[in-house]
Image (cartoon, rainbow, N blue to C red):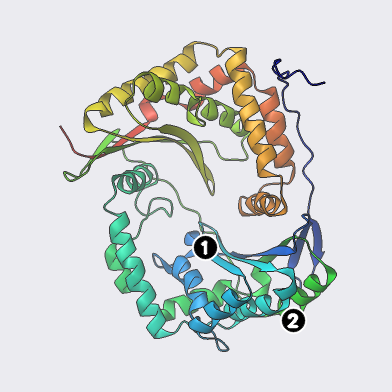
Amino acid sequence: MLNRTLQPEIRPIEPISIPAPDKQIMPNGIPLFLIQAGEEEVVRLDILIHGGQWNQSLPLQAMFTNRMLREGTRRFTSAEIAEKLDYYGAWLDLSSSMNYAYITLYSLNKYFSQTVEIVCSLILEPTFPEKEFSITIEKNRQQFNVNNSKVDVLARKELNRSLFGPEHPCGKYAVEEDYNKLTRSSLIQFHQQFYHSGNCTLYLSGKVTREIVQALETTFGQYSWGNTDMTVSTPVYTPHTKSEKRILIKREDAMQNALYMGCMTIDRKHSDFLKLRVLIALLGGYFGSRLMNNIREEKGYTYGIGAGIVSYPECSVILISTQAANEYTEAIIREVYHELERLQNEQVTEKELSMVKNYMMGEICRNYEGPFSLADAYIYLQSSDLERTFLMQSQQAIKETTASDIQRLARTYIVKEELKEIIAGKMK
């Protein structure tokens, strides 16, 4: 009999094997990655178009080209698209990033041939109708004004501007006037340049059957589509970091201040990057982190504070962020530096380091437990230009990180003088 009065033995989580997708090349040359897993009669189709904010000639151009796909095609109106997807129990998600556009379809297996036909029309023959374009612009303009009144949004944008400069894609944010400059023809131009069969990759995950693969090949894989003569170039931008260490953004109507601290750091391909993630998790990457224990649990200055690494093409940013009452802002900054100095001057205990490692390994196990999360992992690798070995290397780095590594990384990559301090809200 199991003795429930005894605590189970705590054991470290060993690296897990992460299944790789099967790669096929469709007749027209499009790469198709299949992730066969799960028992439910449902699949997810991810279509990656290589072209995002990094490649746009106008602010908002990449995002609105993607968003307008569902607003009408040569075969379907926006109302018909919404009605048909709802009827078949499907879900469509459209998004864009620095260097990719994503079209994601969740569909029941039995209706996949019908739903993928709709998605095919969205990508191959969108019309970008003028009426829907105007409505979409106005709706997003209103949301922009709402978001731009929030102190955390203002602080986050200003941090990137101060690190990259206002002309760099990572520091260049749209302003309200940009909504007036965007035109329907600029979206058509972006679509013609990037949305073609020579510039996309497909991921199909879930309970994939031969019939579903055939339906996908029939719609997307038989012939070349779009202007395949268009080539994608990746412009090179140089960051121009501001000299100011502290930047204040006054918002007298703010209920709380937003504090963002950050600095440039190594990119994902650097040999120290994976162990640096362990350091940042220990500092502020989970509920039991140094910053949470000190600033939330002991001092009660804030409900939550976190640290992380935000990766962009060619570089990354170490970020520490929180929101708190105005009177606590300076005290929080002092405590952040105090915790950084502790990491630089004192070696972390094995008990604390083991806890962080187990947390991170547990997150990896959770993130790779289903077909859709596996698709997310391999899409991340492609969009970040990383090799598949990155997934196993991530686990190995967690396991091998030592207390000495943590101290060395803290001294090397988190320099107090290089951390920007962005405060948005009421000023004393």
Total number of numbered discs in the rendering: 2
Q: Percent x, y for residue 225? A: 67, 80
Label 2: how many Cα within 10 Å (few below 14, some 14–19, many 20+): some
The three-letter amino acid code for the residue at tag 2 is Tyr
* Label 1, label 2: how far apart the Cα atoms are: 26 Å
Question: Mark 1 near mark 2, Cβ–Cβ under 8 Å?
Answer: no
Image quadrant where residue 228 sits: bottom right
Residue 228 visible here: no
Rendered residue at 52%/29% (across/down):
280
Q: Percent x, y for residue 98? A: 50, 56
Rendered residue at 58%/78% (across/down):
122
Q: Is residue 157 above or below residue 11?
A: below
**Which label's residue is closer to the chain start, 1 or 2?**
1
For residue 104, side relative to residue 30 (left or right): left
The three-letter amino acid code for the residue at tag 1 is Ser
Q: Percent x, y for residue 261? A: 37, 34
For residue 416, side relative to residue 364 (left or right): left
Rendered residue at 49%/59% (across/down):
54
Quadrant containing the C terminus in the rendered view: top left
Picture disc at residue 341: none
Label 1: how many Cα within 10 Å (few below 14, some 14–19, many 20+): some
Q: Is residue 310 above or below residue 406?
A: below
Picture disc at residue 223: 2
Q: Is residue 177 above or below residue 369?
A: below
Quadrant containing the N terminus in the rendered view: top right
Rendered residue at 54%/58% (across/down):
99
For residue 236, side relative to residue 115 (left or right): left
Q: Which residue is mark 1?
A: 95
Q: Percent x, y for residue 365? A: 70, 38
Q: Secondary structure at mark 2?
A: loop
Image quadrant where residue 169 sits: bottom left
